Amino acid sequence: MTRMAGRNFLFVPGPTNVPDRVQRAMVVAMEDHRSSKFPELTLGVLSGLKRVFKTAAGTPIIFPSSGTGCWEAALTNCLSPGDKVLASRFGQFSHLWIDMCERLGFEVETIDCEWGTGVPVDRYRAALEADRSRKIKAVLACHNETATGVTSDIAAVRRAIDSVGHPALLFVDAVSSLASIDFRMDEWGVDVCVSGSQKGLMLPAGLGVTCVSPKALAARKSARQPRCYFDYGDMIKANESGYFPYTPALPMLYGLREALQILLEEEGLETVFARHSYLANGVRAAVQEGWKLRLCAKEPKWHSDTVSAIVVPEGINGAHVIDVAFRRYNLALGAGLSKVAGKVFRIGHLGDLNELMLIGALGGAELAMLDVGIRIEPGSGVAAAQKYWRANDPVEKKKVSRSEVIYASHSTGSTEGAHQ
Ligand SMILES: *Cc1c(COP(=O)(O)O)cnc(C)c1O
């Protein structure tokens, strides 16, 4: 075994870096989850999640699962055996949800799209319009396709459904967008939003975090698909008084409480979104202007603010870049999945991160790319990102005023005042 000195740079698009204080908040003694004190924790995190989902009418639910469990919950709670759903496939995650539908026995009308594009809103509208007998019971949309770095317009999907007066439910996978890219449950008329703990929520994997609309809960009443562990009904009933129908993942709930405190009370959700967009623009500048490489996302309208998939030049294996980055530089980059395996590598830029962390990732990616023979100019990506960030900092807290600089130098004992 050779020792890897220094820290590991984790830049896969989930799990993301867990802030130290969130990690510390999870170091707790086990306790009785049926105590009279316990509801305070449950009710607190559930009300915080409502703000994350931007919902007043919806009901957030936390399952002890990963995000995938919430996919299954959406399908089994709201549908009946053999029901038809409309879905689109343009990456590994949109594909896996379709695969699950088929394995659970649902009929899927799949619209296959080029990888690097997103939810085909016009084709959804046409499919729904053609569905005169209203056979389609749910429309599935992947908000942020993590395999290709593509974000889709969920508000437009809602408009398409409404424009033809179709009653289908809208299920959205927001696993790699929630709490990093703006998501609006109520405004967009989303019926089930599916997410997980290990991406924007900055926690380890282990919680399925989902939210269901009143319309979805009404559909559940007559939905006949068998369900048990993931039944919304048992969960909601127990949650009302602050409990769970089975043993909750205690430390994770304490971690979630701390993460929500950071996201909602300290940084603020809108600032979190602005930071992700600003950091992502720096990464895209590095890829396109610095390295002169292409993103897998075909057009700027698809650009994801949480993950970038970078197309490696012909004749180079993307997996090789990732392996060298990991073994030589202790940098974890995301692999190309399925159809784009070997063709791309991914940089996850979501969760608890800043410019300097990304400079580490960009610099490490440059070293690895050079090592495998990709002809980029050393430092070109880092320089392009720096240039972008220096010109575009939108984060108010960083606009340190001159008087604060003077104060800072006094407080460290300098007698010369601000001299920089
Ligand atoms: C990560 C991810 C998933 C899978 O979530 P798990 O928590 O690993 O089950 C599903 N969809 C998208 C878009 C993802 O990024």
Image (cartoon, rainbow, N blue to C red):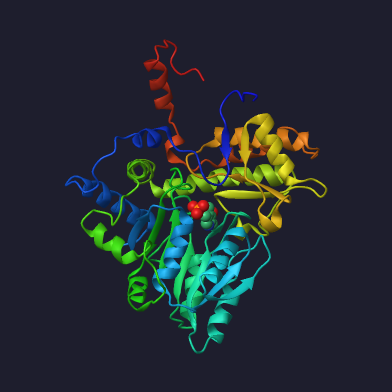
Would you say 225 lies left or right of 119 here? left
226 relative to 279, above or below: below
Image x and y of residue 360, in percent: 61, 32
Q: Quadrant of residue 252?
A: top left
Give the farthest residue toward the right: 315
User: Which residue is painted at 74% across and 32% down in the image?
Assistant: 378
Would you say 163 lies left or right of 212 here? right
User: Which residue is painted at 23% across and 53% down in the image?
Assistant: 242
Q: Quadrant of residue 32?
A: top left
Image x and y of residue 80, in percent: 43, 77
Image x and y of residue 313, in percent: 79, 48
Q: Nearer the viewer, residue 71 or 46?
A: 71
In this view of the protein, can residue 176 be seen by the observer? no
User: Which residue is painted at 42% across and 50% down in the image?
Assistant: 270
Query: How many labels were placed on the picture?
Result: 0
| Quadrant in which the N terminus appears | top right
Image x and y of residue 112, in percent: 65, 70
310 relative to 377, above or below: below
Q: Nearer the viewer, residue 416 or 90?
A: 90
Would you say 208 lies left or right of 296 here? left
Give the farthest residue toward the bottom: 133
User: Which residue is painted at 52% across and 66% down in the image?
Assistant: 141
Give the farthest residue toward the left: 36
In this view of the protein, can residue 128 be seen by the observer? yes
406 relative to 390, above or below: above
71 relative to 13, above or below: below
